[in-house]
Image (cartoon, coloured by chain):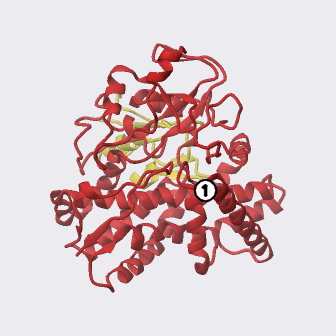
């Protein structure tokens, strides 16, 4: 690519002029340049995909690998920092994906998640109780959205309640793209590793009913998972399940309360909660960076050749607004069904925890509709402040009254 | 009208969406892979079966309505 072209390559991720509106580049690129060169925070270039068919196709195609740690792949984070995608341990897990993914699935099947639902509901009720002990306004994100997924993950990992705050902090730091320095990220990583090593040892001595104990037992039966893999899976569950779901709870409530008619529709017909959750997942403009993939060979995609050595970024959020795949794509329709959005990815690496995430979102929404029908944003939606510098987007605060 | 559900277990990624949507038609093994309980569900479940096929993240479910 010539120097001239390089100067015109847009910076990625894009910024939205309005927090709940899509960046204008999505529609432009979907229309005119579905495979667009972009510049990442590191300065390296990648190819951005914005059409539904392309994003779904690449995510379902094993030639597009998750080996972002290789020297030929584009760096993502600024200041030489390694993001979760490039982490060597994540890469080694990728190689051994087949043998551990099945084990994780055991904990996230529909049946297991359905069995967790009453506990999720009880936690949500407790958090709402605590929030409404003080007079309004309150930050719904800090009081409910942020703690709930950590509580659920701590339950899954058998982490005691007193350590929930520590895990929340590490999770936040490890996902950073630009918000924390490399030193801070490494410090968080080291603290988390140390904690998890001790925790794994404690679970080995005295196994519980949790996911980690199940994985440890599998290791001890000589079934392949190493100590290092256990720690990385523990970390993976935390970063994949915490920040994402917390932010989504905040964004869901901002979208549903931001236009009163949406909240009123759900109050009038709570049976719409399931499709409403799918629609806010589709409609979310701040789901973040997208998923990077790397190819070592030339690959044909929709009549174009993507050269080997290319790092591809799949923007699921842009794909979710593709009018070629969704009728009235720019309209939020809480009854939309079916809704094959790509927010949890697609193909062999689709989010393992999606049933749990859905259950958490549906439960929060049901509990809030029932307990706080007068719930409203305490600031205009357009004044909600976005968090900067994290791979997964969300709001700083979601102030509410009731 | 007959609706036949076809699953490709090699494509299944274990997300469990189908089980959540139509538990009378789909189940999962312990490790997540889809089990087809009823390849020819009654008409009352056709819409849900179509939805499950459409939203399956692995593209592992098809419905055949030709017969």
Residue A269 sits in quarter: bottom left
Image quarter of the N terminus of chain B: top left
Q: Colour of chain A?
A: red
Dot 1 falls on which chain? A
Left or right of A24, for residue A46: right
**Identity of the residue drawn at 35% across and 43% down:** B51
Q: Colour of chain B?
A: yellow
**Identity of the residue drawn at 41% across and 30% down:** A50
Residue A99, position as x, y percentages in the image? 72, 47
Residue A13, position as x, y percentages in the image? 45, 39
Residue beneath disc 1 = A174
- Observer able to see residue A35: yes
Image quarter of the C terminus of chain B: top left
Left or right of B61, for residue A63: right
Residue A46 sits in quarter: top right
Left or right of A337, for residue B38: right
- Observer able to see residue A214: no
Q: Secondary structure at mark 1?
A: helix
Instruction: From this view, report whether residue A164 is shown above or below residue A362.
Output: below
């Amino acid at each position: 690519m010539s120097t001239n072209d390089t100067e015109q390559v847009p910076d990625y991720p894009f910024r939205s002029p309005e927090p709940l509106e899509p960046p204008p580049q999505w529609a432009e690129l979907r229309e005119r340049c579905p495979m667009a060169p972009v510049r990442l925070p590191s300065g390296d270039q990648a190819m951005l995909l914005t059409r539904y068919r392309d994003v779904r196709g690449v995510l379902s195609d094993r030639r597009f690998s998750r080996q972002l740690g290789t020297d030929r792949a584009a760096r993502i984070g600024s200041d030489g920092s390694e993001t979760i995608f490039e982490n060597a341990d994540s890469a080694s897990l990728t190689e051994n994906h087949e043998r551990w993914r099945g084990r994780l699935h055991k904990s996230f099947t529909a049946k297991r998640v359905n069995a967790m639902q009453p506990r999720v509901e009880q936690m949500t009720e407790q958090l709402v109780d605590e929030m409404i002990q003080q007079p309004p306004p309150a930050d719904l994100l800090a009081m409910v959205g942020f703690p709930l997924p950590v509580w659920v993950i701590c339950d899954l990992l058998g982490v005691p309640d007193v350590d929930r705050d520590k895990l929340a902090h590490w999770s936040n730091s490890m996902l950073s793209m630009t918000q924390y320095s490399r030193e801070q990220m490494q410090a968080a990583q080291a603290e988390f590793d140390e904690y998890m090593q001790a925790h794994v040892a404690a679970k080995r001595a005295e196994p519980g009913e949790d996911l980690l104990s199940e994985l440890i037992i599998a290791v001890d039966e000589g079934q392949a998972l190493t100590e290092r893999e256990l720690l990385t899976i523990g970390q993976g569950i935390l970063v994949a399940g915490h920040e994402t779901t917390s932010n989504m709870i905040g964004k869901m409530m901002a979208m549903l309360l931001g236009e009163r008619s949406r909240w009123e529709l759900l109050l009038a017909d709570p049976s719409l909660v399931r499709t409403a959750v799918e629609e806010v997942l589709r409609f979310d403009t701040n789901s973040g960076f997208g998923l990077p993939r790397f190819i070592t060979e030339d690959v044909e995609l929709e009549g174009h050749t993507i050269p080997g050595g290319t790092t591809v970024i799949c923007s699921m959020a842009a794909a979710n607004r593709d009018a070629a795949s969704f009728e009235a794509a720019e309209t939020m329709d809480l009854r939309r069904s079916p809704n094959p959005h790509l927010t949890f990815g697609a193909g062999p690496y689709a989010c393992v925890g999606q049933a749990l995430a859905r259950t958490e979102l549906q439960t929060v929404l049901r509990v809030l509709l029932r307990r706080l029908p007068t719930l409203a944003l305490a600031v205009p939606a357009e004044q909600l402040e976005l968090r900067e510098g994290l791979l997964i987007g969300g709001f700083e605060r979601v102030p509410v009254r009731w | 009208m007959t609706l036949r559900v076809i699953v490709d277990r090699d494509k299944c990624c274990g997300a469990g969406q189908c089980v959540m949507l139509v538990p009378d038609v789909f189940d999962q093994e312990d490790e997540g892979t889809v089990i087809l309980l009823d390849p020819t569900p009654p008409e009352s479940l056709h819409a849900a079966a179509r939805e499950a096929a459409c939203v399956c993240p692995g593209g592992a479910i098809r419905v055949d309505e030709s017969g």
